[in-house]
């Protein structure tokens, strides 16, 4: 079995297959698609204009909190959650090469599901150069979003639901971005400690 934390330390990203499994995978995928179909998501995303997207959603923030221990395991760090964000990409969408803002020091991109001919690769520029990784539904990439540029080329499928979970190192330079500088994460029935 791959040592996730050692791989992460070396290449600044690691792929985690089947991070989210059934039946939860289908529930989150259907939720994202229903939100997109209902018109309750923003279409003014500056990175992918016209694509349904939203952040700080209480359902996805629940996923952010639930995966905190797993992400800490994968990167070998104690983390604070900052925020969640999700998009339902459409045919022809692309994601320009970029690095993330401080609240995204440690990021997870998790494929919830798609309709298309094959998985849509995400590109990342790590210490070993640029490489592409295909993420099947439930697969995730944990990466240093502030340090590693990442992007996607034009999407040739019908749609793809993707959730992004963002964290900061508790002992790192961006620790003050805890909860994305909100007072707390409010999740159905519970709150994370301050």
Image: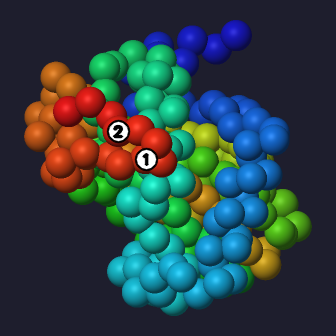
Q: Is residue 194 above or below residue 150?
A: above
Q: Is residue 49 left or right of residue 31?
A: left
In the structure shown, which secondary structural element does the residue marked by tag 2 occupy? strand
How much space separates mark 2 and mark 1, taking CA atoms? 6 Å
Q: Is residue 171 visible from the viewing direction of this image?
A: yes
The quarter of the image holding the C terminus is top left
Assess disc 2: are there few (<14), some (14-19) or many (≥20) residues with their C-alpha within 10 Å of its C-alpha.
few
Name the image colouring: rainbow
Residue that mark 2 sits on: 191
Q: Residue at x 66, y 33 (%)?
A: 19
In the rendered image, residue 74, in percent from the top left (x then y), is placed at 49, 22
Q: Is residue 44 above or below residue 14?
A: below
User: Are discs 2 and 1 less than 8 Å apart at CB?
Assistant: yes
Q: Is residue 26 left or right of residue 37?
A: right
Residue that mark 1 sits on: 187
Choose between 143 and 27: the one closer to the eye.
27
The quarter of the image holding the N terminus is top right
Q: Is residue 71 above or below residue 140?
A: above
Choose between 23 and 108: the one closer to the eye.
23
Q: Residue at x 41, y 64 (%)?
A: 55
In the rendered image, residue 108, in percent from the top left (x then y), is placed at 49, 43
In the rendered image, residue 65, in percent from the top left (x then y), is placed at 44, 36
Q: Is residue 150 visible from the viewing direction of this image?
A: no
């Amino acid at each position: 079995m791959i040592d996730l934390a050692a791989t992460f330390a070396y290449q600044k990203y690691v792929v985690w297959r089947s991070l989210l499994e059934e039946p939860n995978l289908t529930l989150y995928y259907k939720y994202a698609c229903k939100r997109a179909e209902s018109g309750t998501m923003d279409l003014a995303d500056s990175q992918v204009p016209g694509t349904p997207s939203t952040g700080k959603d209480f359902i996805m923030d629940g996923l952010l909190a639930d995966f905190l221990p797993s992400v800490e395991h994968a990167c070998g760090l104690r983390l604070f959650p900052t925020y969640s964000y999700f998009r339902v990409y459409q045919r022809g969408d692309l994601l320009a090469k970029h690095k993330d803002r401080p609240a995204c020091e440690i990021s997870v991109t998790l494929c919830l599901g798609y309709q298309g001919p094959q998985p849509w690769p995400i590109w990342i520029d790590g210490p070993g150069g640029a490489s592409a990784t295909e993420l099947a539904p439930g697969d995730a990439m944990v990466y240093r979003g502030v340090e590693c540029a990442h992007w996607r080329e034009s999407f040739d499928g019908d749609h793809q639901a993707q959730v992004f979970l963002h964290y900061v190192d508790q002992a790192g330079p961006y620790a003050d971005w805890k909860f994305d500088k909100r007072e707390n994460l409010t999740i159905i029935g519970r709150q994370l400690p301050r």
